[in-house]
Image (cartoon, rainbow, N blue to C red):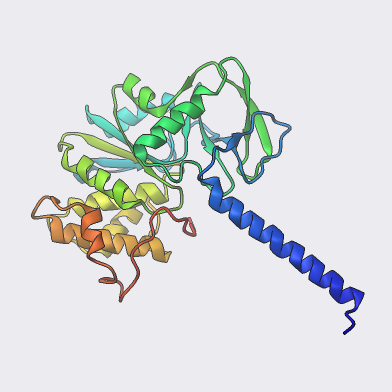
């Protein structure tokens, strides 16, 4: 049987295309398990296995973007803040005791007053790490920034933006301590739902935090992760058993985002809401991860268990 050269070329190109796609997919799967190379030159174009530094907030406002509060619950939420904004945050909150809950899994910190973070194209930085190991990885990343050097900053597209001279490099935990704030890290991958381990950690934190402490939740943009955890806090502190939709609408009213526009997050929130209803009287003695194992397919008409730490399509 004769095969035309045109068909042979088509087969060849299709084979090459399939090989490239498979190679990319395999690279993505393995990226979270290897040490990513950090781009340190403005002339280098980041690739799949690279991580690079981006600027979290470009403009300096009195308060961080998306700052909002629910006074009755003694909680607030916002995007990533600058050290220079902390005094204004304290004035806006008015409480003498404040604990910052940092929901970011990606390594981040400050070069002088500029909030920076490490970024990769598939947002896999620290993706297999719990909160404690995320902090360790973050400290290691920040320790590699040379004091006095000009540090290249990139856009999320990988395009070079500018360079910042690193006079002072600090992490958020130490910065909060310097300003008299408490600090708690609950690492959640960007555009994802938390792992059961992270949810257990959050529940223990809330149970052991006294009512006189104001909690400030934040992620990168102050959108998905921040709104989600503020909603979860409200579910735990829900004496009148308000409905899930009421709680989520409350969060939208104060400046949060719609959380139910994707199935993974909507399913997770339904599970967590029902967990709080069933375990409130016992003061949440049964942790979420144990409870979850026995609830497969119970809610959302047989919906599967929420797949934690997997990316979701963020519309906001």
Q: Residue at left 27%, top 32%?
A: 99
Q: Residue 246: in sight, yes or no? A: no
Q: Please, is residue 44 above or below residue 263 in the view?
A: above
Residue found at the very far front of the displayed protein: 1
Q: Quadrant of residue 177?
A: top left
Q: Nearer the viewer, residue 118 or 159?
A: 118
Q: Residue at left 66%, top 30%?
A: 162
- Is 20 displayed left or right of 275 in the figure? right
Q: Residue at left 45%, top 31%?
A: 138
- Is 240 displayed left or right of 35 in the figure? left
Residue found at the very far left of the displayed protein: 281
Q: Please, is residue 123 above or below residue 116 in the view?
A: below
Residue 180 percent location from the top left of the image: 29, 22
- Is 15 displayed left or right of 4 in the figure? left
Q: How many marks?
A: 0
Q: Nearer the viewer, residue 30 or 55?
A: 30
Q: Please, is residue 11 above or below residue 155 in the view?
A: below
Image quarter where the N terminus lies is bottom right
- Is 121 displayed left or right of 65 in the figure? right
Q: Quadrant of residue 305?
A: bottom left
Residue 135 percent location from the top left of the image: 39, 32
Residue 239 percent location from the top left of the image: 12, 55
Q: Nearer the viewer, residue 210 or 26?
A: 26
Q: Residue 209: in sight, yes or no? A: yes
Residue 296 percent location from the top left of the image: 28, 68
Residue found at the very far bottom of the displayed protein: 1
């Amino acid at each position: 049987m004769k095969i035309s050269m045109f068909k042979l070329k088509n087969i060849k190109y299709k084979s090459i295309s399939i090989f490239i796609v498979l190679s990319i997919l395999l690279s993505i799967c393995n990226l979270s398990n290897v040490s990513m190379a950090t781009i340190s030159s403005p002339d280098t174009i980041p690739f799949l296995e690279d991580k690079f530094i981006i600027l979290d907030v470009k403009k300096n406002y009195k308060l961080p973007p998306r700052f909002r509060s629910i006074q009755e619950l003694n909680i607030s939420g916002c995007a990533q803040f600058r050290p220079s904004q902390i005094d204004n945050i304290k004035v806006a909150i008015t409480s003498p005791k404040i604990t910052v809950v940092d929901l970011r899994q990606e390594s981040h910190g400050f070069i002088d007053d500029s909030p920076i973070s490490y970024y990769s194209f598939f947002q896999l930085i620290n993706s297999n790490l719990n909160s404690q190991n995320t902090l360790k990885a973050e400290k290691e990343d920040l320790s590699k920034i040379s004091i006095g050097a000009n540090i290249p900053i990139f856009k999320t597209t990988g395009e070079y933006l500018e360079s910042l001279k690193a006079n002072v490099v600090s992490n958020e935990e130490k910065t909060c301590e310097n300003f008299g704030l408490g600090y708690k890290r609950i690492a959640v991958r960007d555009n994802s739902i938390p792992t059961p381990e992270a949810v257990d950690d959050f529940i223990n934190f809330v149970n052991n935090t006294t009512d006189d402490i104001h909690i400030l939740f934040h992620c990168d943009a102050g959108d998905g992760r921040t709104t989600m955890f503020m909603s979860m806090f409200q579910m735990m502190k829900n004496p009148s058993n308000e409905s899930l939709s009421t709680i989520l609408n409350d969060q939208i009213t104060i400046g949060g985002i719609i959380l139910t526009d994707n199935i993974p997050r909507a399913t997770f929130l339904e599970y967590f809401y029902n967990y709080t209803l069933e375990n409130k009287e016992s003061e949440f003695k049964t942790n979420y991860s144990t409870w979850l194992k026995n609830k497969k397919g119970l809610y959302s008409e047989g919906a599967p268990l929420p797949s934690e730490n997997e990316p979701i399509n963020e519309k906001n």
